């Protein structure tokens, strides 16, 4: 995982910040603060992210491809340009439908 933030005061095409790597999940931090962080993630075909539970709300926006996102027991199909908020403490599992890229924003403030 790359934890170096990208350069500030520079315009980016978000989908181009990160590349696909064969048989890999790649995470690049855009911004990391004590109150939360923003990352861009690429997932190659055949790869998936393990189920997790975050103590914080998480905003996910698909910027390339399509993904199946299971929150609790509910399946959501999120396509390019769409976004969803995963509530704090909700178990969730990302199941790609082919390769995809997403922006993930975690907001930590408001929780003790």
Image (cartoon, rainbow, N blue to C red):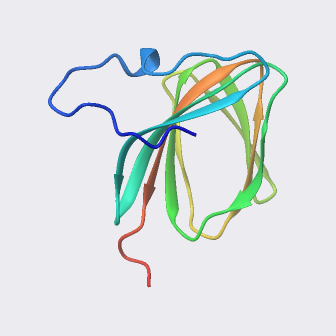
Q: Nearer the viewer, residue 91 or 49?
A: 49
Q: In this view, does 76 lie to the left or right of 103?
A: right
Give the x, y percent position of residue 109. 35, 71
Which image quarter holds the N terminus? top right
* Residue furthest out toward the right: 46
Residue 29 occupies which quadrant of the picture?
A: top left
Q: Which of 92 and 72 is in front in this view?
A: 92
Q: Is residue 92 left or right of residue 79?
A: right
**Tag count in the figure?**
0
Give the x, y percent position of residue 82. 51, 30
Q: Which of 106 and 59 is in front in this view?
A: 106
Instruction: Please give the name of the residue rendered at 21% of the width and 20% of the height, measured from the top-left corner.
Output: 11
Is 101 rendered above or below residue 108? Answer: above
Instruction: Please give the name of the residue rendered at 37% of the width and 76% of the height, measured from the top-left corner.
Output: 110
Which image quarter holds the C terminus? bottom left
Is 112 rendered above or below residue 66? Answer: below
* Residue furthest out toward the bottom: 112
* Residue furthest out toward the left: 9
Give the x, y percent position of residue 70. 76, 47
Q: Is residue 7 left or right of residue 51?
A: left
Is 55 rendered above or below residue 13? Answer: below
Instruction: Please give the name of the residue rendered at 39% of the width and 59% of the height, measured from the top-left corner.
Output: 36
Residue 14 occupies which quadrant of the picture?
A: top left
Instruction: Please give the name of the residue rendered at 57% of the width and 67% of the height, measured from the top-left corner.
Output: 88
Give the x, y percent position of residue 57. 50, 62
């Amino acid at each position: 995982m790359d934890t170096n933030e990208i350069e500030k005061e520079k315009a980016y095409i978000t989908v181009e910040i990160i590349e696909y790597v064969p048989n890999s999940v790649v995470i690049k931090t855009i911004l990391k603060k004590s109150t939360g962080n923003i990352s861009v993630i690429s997932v190659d075909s055949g790869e998936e992210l393990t189920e997790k539970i975050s103590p914080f709300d998480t905003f996910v926006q698909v910027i390339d491809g399509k993904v199946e996102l299971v929150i609790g027991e509910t399946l959501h199909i999120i396509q390019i340009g769409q976004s969803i908020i995963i509530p704090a403490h909700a178990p969730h599992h990302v199941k790609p439908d082919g390769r995809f890229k997403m922006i993930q924003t975690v907001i930590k403030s408001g929780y003790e």
